[in-house]
Image: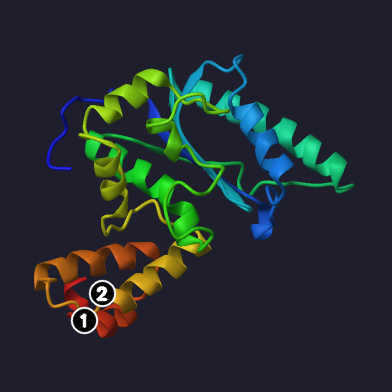
Amino acid sequence: MARLARKIQNGNIFHIITKGINREKIFSRKSYKEMILDLYFDEKYDWKIYAYTIMDNHTHFLVYVKGVNDLSEIMKSINVKYSRFYNYVNDRNGHLFQNRYKSVEIKSDKQLFEVLRYIHNNPVFAGIENELGRYEFTSYKNFFIRNINYPIDKEFVDKVRDNFENQENFYDFHKERFFSIEMDTKEDIIYAQNYIMKYINAKNLKREELLEYGKKLVNLGFSKRFVGEKLKVSRRKL
């Protein structure tokens, strides 16, 4: 994607991540995934959903809210309702989510597109699908197919589509090699390790690119020693 044809980011956009406590697969069943989606898409909540992916043990949502306080209240309501549902069905007690939720504010269009791509690629990272669009519980198809069960914000969809000539370009954008500072799940680490092994000997990667990827790997939690050895770059520059 060479340029942004239409500005999208305008404040109050957040990437929200929720995780099952102790990596528990709290969304393992189809009915569980549908339940959490029903809660997020409840019209009583004053927010706009821009993208999502529901995995077995965590979720990703990209949302617009009027304020941080609104986000906190909405997430509290959703988490409480889902916890009651899940605990009742599974005859369990206690906390269900790890640290309630994590939110990252989107501060630029570049960051927004990176997060959008990252969210849609989660099933690929986990090895659930080899090709984008086959996994049912992601918003990827919303951008070029209408009448989806859980329709994301139409205005956002239109703005995103304005930046791509067609569906093929949108697909190619998602297939580009990338790392994201948002990566923080087991699936992300596995993906990153596979990425290193696949591209470590690629002759088309310049030294500056290797250093850039190396720094992002360190941000993911890899040691400088590990990254330096794998990429053959100086640890002092990471």
Q: The disc labelled 1 sits on which kind of residue?
A: Asn
| Residue on which the image places disc 1 | 201
x and y percentages locating residue 63 in the rendered image: 45, 29
Q: Residue 83, relative to residue 187: is it above or below?
A: above
Give the side of residue 65 with respect to residue 20, left or right.
left
Q: Residue 24, relative to residue 46: is it above or below?
A: below
Q: Which quarter shows the N terminus?
A: top left
**Residue 80 visible here:** yes
Instruction: Tell me the SS state at disc 2.
Output: helix
Instruction: Tell me the SS state at disc 1.
Output: loop
The residue shown at (50%, 54%) is: 123
The residue shown at (44%, 37%) is: 141
| Residue on which the image places disc 2 | 199
Residue 199, quarter of the rendered image: bottom left
The residue shown at (47%, 37%) is: 139
Give the side of residue 166 with respect to residue 94, left or right.
left
Give the side of residue 143 with respect to residue 7, left or right.
right
**Residue 9 visible here:** no
The residue shown at (74%, 46%) is: 95
Give the side of residue 28 with respect to residue 113, left or right.
right
Q: The disc labelled 2 sits on which kind of residue?
A: Tyr
x and y percentages locating residue 17 in the rendered image: 51, 44
Q: Residues within 10 Å of mark 1 (few under 14, many from 20)?
A: few
Q: Which quarter shows the C terminus?
A: bottom left
- Labelled pair 1, 2 in contact (Cβ < 8 Å): yes
